[in-house]
Image (spheres, rainbow, N blue to C red):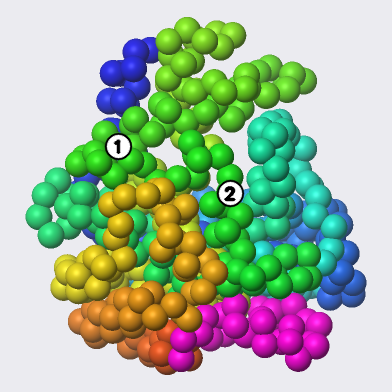
């Protein structure tokens, strides 16, 4: 493998060029046992709930619409919807599969809780012993507690949209720029993780604060001075440290400290890397916007109830409707800062994680973005219910200088000891 060959491969694989059409969403949940919510859920209960799901989806999948289920290292459950043609189909498919998932967990006395960090003071532990996660744990432990907290104590909503076209109003470069500029507004508007270990942290989005403290070679956004996002991403991939090196069964996957993939290509490491190694390396990178053929927006806290619907509708409307995109880009431009640290360590991202909608500048930008999304949904046939949901969220939170985290803080101040209910829908 050569560096130029690796860059060419990454550019081609990570950005699929074409008219935006598909929409997907990945929704993570903490799992609490209603009989003893302060204790970690026993892994056998998690597996029993998952195994109880009847087959019946496409290709024998366990869920009706074919969503993929995975367990995260701390026992969080992630539902990844199949790519759907348009926003309405994505929401319908995901609702159907979530209904089946909730029922299967409820039958085991388990509840799915939507929040960016686990709100309860209960032991965090790794429930998976896959060599990938063991290597991740060792890699992140060398730089403090943040990686372990991320792996076992955080959850998110991730919206996935097509990368875009070669040029025009839906050009890749434009959608890439909008997704990054939109980041701090999404962090702030949907901040939903004000506690960790049962205590207030001083952040509305503790999850975002955790991510901003982790290995910068894999969590910062790519360098902004590259005009072509494909080249910027290819350089980013090569300069990121190798987190794990796959080996035969029984051997640890620990990678040499400080080894970047570029170093590996140039001869460092115990063997030459392959294209398969390069593709696997990409799965260990966690910037705010990750290109995987499509664009995966990763900066949003998990939401209570069906709050993920508002997230998905807002993001899709702003990126896929050219008029809404124009309005959003103009509203977000004042937040842009060419100097200083890259997202998510920049000043505006820190304000988003700490103050959220209490920050006047972020609030103004958010209200303009919500209004642009409202207009875009009004132009989308059949989106009336989604438009109402987005408008109700905007009125309840940004219009009042609040975010979902403020509901948790209000409950904490009042002495209420409860987990955010999966039925608590904005």
Instruction: State which mark lies toward you, 1 or 2.
Output: 2
Marking on residue 213: 2
Q: Nearer the viewer, residue 163 or 184?
A: 184
Taking the image as drawn, is residue 371 in sight?
Answer: yes
Q: In which quarter of the view is residue 247 placed?
A: top right
Q: Residue at x 38, y 34 (%)?
A: 236
**Dot 1: element:** helix
Q: Which residues are magenta?
A: 400-426
Q: Residue at x 44, y 77 (%)?
A: 359
Query: Is 152 left or right of 78, judged from the image as shown?
Result: right
Query: Is 283 left or right of 224, judged from the image as shown?
Result: right
Q: Residue at x 78, y 65 (%)?
A: 197
Percent position (x, y) of residue 157? 52, 63
Using a 10 Å C-alpha cutoff, classify the residue at mark 1 as few (fewer than 14 neighbours), some (14 to 19) or many (20 or more).
some
Percent position (x, y) of residue 99? 60, 74
Q: Residue furthest front?
A: 340
Q: What's the distance in space between the residues labelled 1 and 2, CA to CA? A: 22 Å
Query: Is 173 left or right of 287, judged from the image as shown?
Result: left
Percent position (x, y) of residue 50? 72, 58
First along the sequence among labels 1 and 2 = 2
Marking on residue 12: none
Is residue 180 located in the magenta-colored stretch of the structure? no
Residue 245 vertical position relative to residue 234 in the rendered view, above or below: above
Is residue 419 located in the magenta-colored stretch of the structure? yes
Taking the image as drawn, is residue 302 in sight?
Answer: no
**Dot 2: element:** loop
Q: In which quarter of the view is residue 278 placed?
A: top left
Q: Residue at x 22, y 44 (%)?
A: 17
Q: In which quarter of the view is residue 257 placed?
A: top right
Q: Residue furthest left?
A: 168
Q: Nearer the viewer, residue 370 or 92?
A: 370
Marking on residue 232: 1
């Amino acid at each position: 493998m050569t560096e130029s060959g690796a860059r060419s491969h990454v550019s081609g694989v990570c950005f699929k060029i074409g008219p935006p059409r598909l929409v997907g969403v990945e929704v993570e949940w903490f799992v609490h046992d209603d009989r003893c919510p302060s204790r970690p859920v026993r892994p056998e209960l998690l597996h029993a709930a998952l195994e109880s799901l009847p087959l019946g989806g496409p290709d024998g999948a366990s869920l009706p619409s074919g969503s993929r289920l995975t367990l995260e290292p701390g026992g969080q459950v992630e539902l990844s919807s199949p790519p759907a043609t348009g926003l309405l189909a994505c929401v319908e498919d995901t609702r159907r599969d979530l209904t089946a998932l909730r029922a299967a967990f409820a039958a085991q006395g388990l509840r799915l809780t939507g929040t960016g960090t686990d709100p309860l003071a209960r032991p965090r532990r790794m429930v998976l012993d896959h060599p990938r996660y063991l290597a991740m744990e060792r890699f992140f432990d060398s730089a403090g507690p943040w990686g372990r907290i991320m792996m076992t104590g955080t959850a998110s909503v991730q919206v996935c949209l097509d990368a875009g076209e070669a040029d025009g109003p839906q050009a890749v470069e434009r959608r890439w720029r909008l997704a990054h500029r939109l980041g701090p507004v999404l962090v702030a508007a949907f901040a939903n993780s004000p506690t960790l270990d049962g205590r207030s942290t001083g952040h509305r989005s503790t999850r975002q604060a955790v991510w901003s403290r982790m290995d910068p070679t894999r969590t910062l956004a790519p360098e902004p001075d590259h005009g072509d996002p494909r080249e910027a991403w290819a350089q980013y991939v090569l300069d990121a440290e190798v987190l794990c090196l796959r080996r035969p069964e029984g051997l640890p996957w620990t990678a040499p400290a400080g080894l970047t993939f570029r170093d590996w290509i140039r001869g460092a490491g115990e063997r030459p890397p392959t294209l398969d190694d390069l593709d696997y390396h990409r799965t260990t990178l966690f910037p705010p916007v990750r290109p995987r053929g499509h664009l995966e927006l990763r900066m949003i806290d998990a939401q209570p109830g069906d709050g993920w619907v508002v997230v998905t509708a807002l993001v899709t409307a702003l990126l896929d409707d050219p008029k809404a995109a124009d309005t959003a880009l103009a509203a977000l431009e004042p937040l842009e800062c060419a100097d200083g640290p890259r997202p998510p360590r920049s000043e505006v991202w820190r304000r988003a994680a700490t103050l959220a909608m209490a920050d006047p500048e972020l609030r103004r930008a958010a209200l303009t973005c919500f209004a642009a999304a409202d207009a875009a949904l009004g132009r989308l046939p059949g989106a009336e219910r989604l438009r109402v949901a987005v408008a109700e969220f905007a009125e309840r939170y940004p219009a009042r200088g609040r975010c979902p985290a403020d509901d948790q803080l209000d409950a904490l101040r009042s002495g209420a000891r409860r987990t955010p209910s999966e039925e608590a829908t904005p």
